[in-house]
Amino acid sequence: MSRPPTSRRLALAIPAALGAFALTVLPASATSSPAQIATSKTNGVAYLKSLQAADGSYAGSGLSSEWAFGALAAAGTAVADVAPGGDTTKNARTVYRNLLSTAAWPSATPVVTDYERATLNAYAAGIDPARVSPSRNLIADIYGYWQTAEAGYFGPSGNFNGTVFAALALNGARTQSGAQRVPQALADRITTRVRANQHNDGGWDYQKAEGNPTRLNAPSDVDMTGAAMAALCTAGVPNTDADIVQAKAFLKTRLLPANGAFDSLYGANTNSNGWAVAGLNACGINPQTGDFLTSMGRTPVDFLIANQYNPGGGFKYKPTDTTPSAYSSVDALRAVAGGGFTAAPPTPVTAGAPRWVAASAFTPGTATELALTVDDGAGALKVCSVALTPTGATTTLGNVLDAAASAATPAGCVTAVTPSSGTGAITALNGKANSGSGTWKVSTDGSALAAASRARVINVGDTIALRWGA
């Protein structure tokens, strides 16, 4: 296959502070020095800044350069500080947030990866993805693609890419305080699916392989192996886990001694190497030492930096190319900077620019969505996006559950709630009643579970998790 992987991958959805391994102090055995990496980052940031349009935008129709946000953040540059000609009214963060807030975005026929892409990039830009605006909640948008018949998959299961990036987005885009916003039960369901799709050679590709011996025996893809590794590690899987160890071993088999590149299905190229290094970074595996320092003294980071134009800062797709590629530059810089597939936003240096921007309240009378999970404590997990139109700046759990009974995607998240009105404690949900120490409890944005009541205040963008248990 001759086309570069970017055309397939970035059109779908791509690659938080994912627990990235910071490449600031390296052992003597590493080849690219801290000074070389610092220079690469500085020049790479300058190139990505040059991609900004005169109106301040990075995103547009079709493939776009908004993936630059994760690379900029990993390299220590706040997206809110990136403005054409220094015009702060057109800074990249504000322009992107305005785009995501429009009713016409992303298109008339969206797919789950549209929302995963936006979640990862909004997070890196310092936009709370659940609170882009009073009406735009990207976390809820992703929840709406949960596959009830194949729990753990998001979007059509045949496109495994959508499930990998659901894991990266939902686990990687943490709350403003740094907490995991989705319940662990959800993270675990996705993790189970990612594990089930691991090929026999230790890697992954973008197609579903679970239950298909032919696909499981097919050669893996270097870039999707990096993404799947990151998906597992952002969910809390340690790098000593057997599946991560096998994935690491697969990547080692693809390493070319002479230049340190991973020999992907598309040959040695910057994008595939960027994704593989990002996966290693996300799992806290140093891509400059040990298994990834070749017999000829080269590493994947060496290969990436060798493909960079200096002082121009852009990276080319293949060593034989003569011009830089925007997508290659994003993938390479993010990896060289020690990042995974997104990064926590740095604090802007622009006067008055906060680290985070987010809607603070519902707009009464304006339709919105909320992300909801219902866990019966016995293995059944329901996931959905709830559509509702608040009448005030806040709403209540009772109102959300009432709306979920008739306006949830996918349907069936809530079938019955007791009591059906008032403000009292919730005593039964979906036919399961409180019994002894087993009661319904609620958490929002990863907070501690507390007794669930209809009166519980729900704010704009809250990620709501209900669970039955002691």
Image (tube, rainbow, N blue to C red):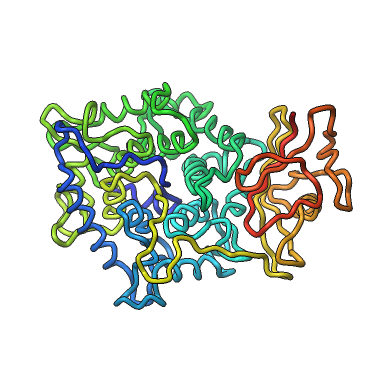
Residue 159 showing in the rendered view: no
Image check: 335 left or right of 408?
left
Q: Which residue lies furthest to the front in this view?
A: 351
| x and y, in percent, of residue 166 in the image | 52, 44
Quadrant the N terminus occupies: top left
Q: Which of 85 and 388 is in front in this view?
A: 85
Please tell me which residue is depicted at 83% across the width and 43% down the height of the picture. 426
Residue 73: quarter of image? bottom left
Q: In this view, does 135 lie above or below 426?
A: below
Q: Nearer the viewer, residue 281 or 216?
A: 281
Residue 190: quarter of image? top right
Q: Which of 215 and 51 is in front in this view?
A: 51
Image check: 80 left or right of 412?
left
Q: Is residue 160 above or below residue 125?
A: above
Image check: 373 left or right of 22?
right
Quadrant the C terminus occupies: top right
| x and y, in percent, of residue 78 in the image | 36, 61
Q: In this view, does 183 lie above or below 36?
A: above
| x and y, in percent, of residue 380 in the image | 71, 32
Q: Nearer the viewer, residue 329 or 159?
A: 329
Please tell me which residue is depicted at 56% across the width and 37% down the height of the picture. 187
Please tell me which residue is depicted at 26% across the width and 26% down the height of the picture. 253
Q: Is residue 124 above or below residue 428?
A: below
| x and y, in percent, of residue 219 in the image | 35, 30
Question: How many callouts does the rendering have?
Answer: 0
Residue 240 showing in the rendered view: yes
